Amino acid sequence: MRTVDLVIIGGGPAGMGAAIAAYDAGVRDILVLERDHRLGGILEQCIHNGFGLHRFKEELTGPEYAWRFEKELRERQIPFRLNTMVLDLSDEKIVTAMNAEEGIFQVQAKAVILAMGCRERPRGALNTPGTRPAGIYTAGTAQRYINIMGYMPGKKVVILGSGDIGLIMARRMTWEGAKVEMVLELMPYSGGLTRNIVQCLQDNDIPLLLSHTIVEVHGKERVCGVTIAQVDENRQSMMETARFVECDTVLLSVGLLPENELTRKAGVPMDARTSGAVVDQRRMTEIPGIFACGNVLHVHDLVDYVSEEAEIAGKGAAEYILRANSSQVEPITIQPGKGIRYTLPQRIDRCEDTTIFFRVTDVHAAVRIRVKNGEGTVMMRKRPRVAPGEMETVRLLGTKLQNYVGQTLTIELEEETEHGT
Amino acid sequence: MEREIICTSCPMGCHVTVTMNGEEITSITGNTCARGERYARSEITNPTRTLTTTVALTDGGVLPVKSDAPLAKKEIPHYLEQIHEVIVERPVLMGDIILEDIDGNGVNIIATQNVF
Amino acid sequence: MVYDVAVIGAGVVGGLIARELSRYRLSIVIVERSHDVAMGTTKANSAIVHAGYDAECGSLKAKLNVEGSRMMEGLCKKLGVKYIRNGSLVVAYRTQDMERVQELYERGQKNGVEGLEILDSKALHQMEPSLSETACGALFAPTGAIVCPYELNVAAVGNAMDNGADLLLDWEVTAIAAEQDGYILHSGGNSVKARYVVNAAGVYADHIAAMVGDTSFTIHPRKGQYMLLDHDCVGTVRHTLFNVPNELGKGILVTPTVDQNMLLGPTAEDQEDREDTSITAEGLQKVQENARKVVPTINLRGVITAFAGLRAVGNTGDFIIESPRHGFWNVAGIESPGLSSAPAIAVYVVECLESQGLSLPPKDDFVEERRAPHRFNTLSMEEKNRVIQENPLYGHVICRCESITEGEIVDAIRQNPGARDLDGVKRRTRAGMGRCQGGFCGPMVTEILARELGIPLEQVTKFGGSSYLNVGKTRGGADA
């Protein structure tokens, strides 16, 4: 069987970023496997701008952001295969892949980086009552129709869910001549970025109805309308508020799910909170030599963060391949506490400066983020505003981590008003 | 008169209050940094947006494009119409000018993808 | 031309009848109002091959169910259709329900069902460890099985077509004229003539019968709502789990499917509307509650889709296979166990036609087997490589969730009866049937359909009629 030092599954921003970082850290024998006919992943259909503000200090479109990485990949002559689907991954790091030219082939890797991205939650997961006509798409499917294929899914649109792709598609479809009637959001706040609410909805006079949902889909062959209703604080529909809205298209933007089929096949332990693998600070999973980064690990709101994480994973994999040194200390466990949905990494086994990424469960103004070991406070950080849609970070210094070897650190949220400021 | 603007310069999304006396801005409050003030000022005087869309390729595909600088927000529908008239032949390289000086101020519509 | 036999309805019953007829030197036409086969009751039911203990002794249902259940495995093999004999359990949750289990056991014995056993709680839980602790016993029917109804349906019609039968789709019978020597079926301005007619029109069978003056029976639709769970939920349950029917109703089943999903349902809701297959919050609630009662650990977050189907319930309590006038046969009221009985119904109906003078000269070149499509992800590595070498389209995965290749999709469009829409591809190949429900592959399958059928992209539909998928090019799209 062919052997390769590092196999990277996925040629989107995560996979490309990891490949470049691993190369720059000294790994030369790399193979990137991409299922689409080009590199770039989902960025290729994200033709709007707003990518790269953190990383490049400029506003790029998705394809432009992807090209920056593809160029670097090509300059380094890192090998990649397109139209290649990975069918299996074993815990021994045997990768089984397939394409039309080579058929099925297997590669024994020293290390593997999982970078398969995520997919959208479909209607089925929502069990929306009503008929099952044509005209119901996830926002990303509509994006592919319009931006890649050049076809319009419909003319009169209701969008369920205020995730960023839904907001972006509200503007995109308006600019292509469709009438976007409204965006409905089940929660009392939007899951999308503020700039998207302003530039996609407010700019185009598209109403955002918070605490609303679709209670019935109508139409036998093609959607002809939806019944919408307000929901109470327990997210139960208040049928007395129900009303009919005519439309021929429903777009769903109700969340993203990491695509971890291969991760599960390899038997990598998962975190139910992130729907991704449990990883350490290098983004190594609990199976030594298997790493993960990007949306397959946890869903990011900005691609800039994906690139940052890819770099960590790429470096981590390089270190694993070249030096094969493992943990240095007994692991420190990081776990979410009050008000926190998840933390990443979940484990630290080296006392170096480490950024912990996390998401909160609700929107809050003026909060303190506290990292605790039992009752003691390890560190505290104030934030003027937090929201579930926006990833938060705390940075733990290596010198400080030395004091907590083998312990569990909990990240908690407290509202400043509760304790005074 | 007061106008509230949500700043989009960063994810914080400050609610900035702009107080005006006729056309004149008398105060800007609620922003947490200088970018917030700049953003609020431009939103009042001349709001601009980067425009992104697709143009047709002669073989039936589409090519993503953008304005290489922000354009006046209120003129965007008008610019879109102009852009959608264009049909481009392959190959096109990222950065190629598709429509030159669309607004009379030197803003070009450029390709954002390589198509071969 | 005059056909020997016209079959109205390309569901699993009509399809198998046509296939059975295609053994003989007869000209056969199947007419179907929908854009594809398997679009009525066949599309959405419990996908169970019942053992045959349920139907009243001496009824047509009992006879045809037991016969059909015996025939099913061999038939599936010939048609290249998946069939798994996983066994059924009729589970009692109250001691008084064990009497009912005993009754079913005795009835099953009389009906000729093989291998029935009554299990106590311990034996039952050994067999199904994740079953609720409150389960106190069950009837075990080892001949109970699972099959995919539309897969069987497509294969049956395909095999009939391969053996010369014609299929007319989008062909709704609007009037029937009885002639001296047969019947003329009208559909709008089109017509076909046939010496014999089989009415297998599902929920509309009474309307069709009325067109020749037969109003002796009525059909009413009974809605069943279902939920389908993702592959990772499989393994929780191996057998098909029924509840003992009691005064609280017939209960809702929990079963694995041949495609490694878990199926929960159905509800039983009588309604007037013969088209309404909408799902309701209350219906799904009921399905979920029952599933939790049967398997308390069931992962309901694994739901990938919910759907509803209509059973064609007749007013006689039994299958209605009768001839109101010479040469015209109703095959109506084929509710549960209709799928299980379908192979036997087909043979029985051909005998009925023969009894009215249809001569059945055997066809020398009848091919009773149908090439099973490559199910790529079930092949060995060597086989996969061989298939890709023959046709590189098999090396291109289109549906990521179910690992369905372009080769399989093209095959489904080309093989009888060819898929003509997105749902048709989905039913034949499972592309779009997985956890993302076509989010990734839908646009790509649409492109393949347009290419293979030689039609513009905007003419590709989800399931025919006005179920269009897009409204044409974007403003920035060319009129290439």
Image: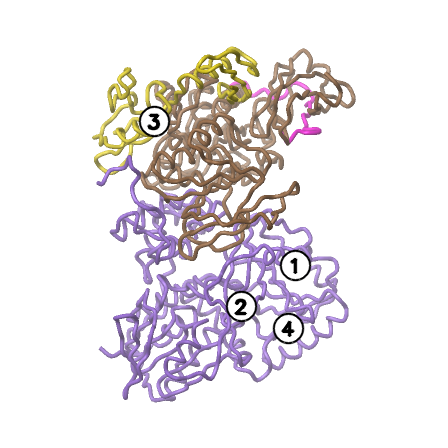
Q: Residue at x 74, y 62 (%)?
A: C122
Disc 4 versus disc 3: distance between alpha carbons? 74 Å
Amino acid type, label 1:
Asn
The residue at which mark 3 appears reads as B76
CA gap between label 1 and label 3 equals 55 Å
Q: Give coordinates of residue C158: x percent, y percent.
A: 35, 65
Instruction: Write down which chain is painted purple.
Output: C
Which residue carries the number 1 mark?
A: C290
Q: Observer-nearest residue: C344 or A100? A: C344
Q: Colour of chain A?
A: brown
- Could you give the CA–CA distance between mark 3 and mark 2, rounded to whole angstroms? 52 Å
Measure the alpha-carbon separation of dots 4 and 2.
35 Å
Mark sitting on residue C271? 2
The residue located at (30%, 76%) in the rendering is C185
Q: Earlier in the sequence, mark 4 or mark 2?
A: 4
Viewport quadrant of the N terminus of chain A? top left
The yellow-coloured chain is labelled: B
Eye-nearest disc, 4 or 3:
3
Comparing labels 1 and 3, the label whose residue is closer to the camera: 3
**Residue type for callout 2:** Gln
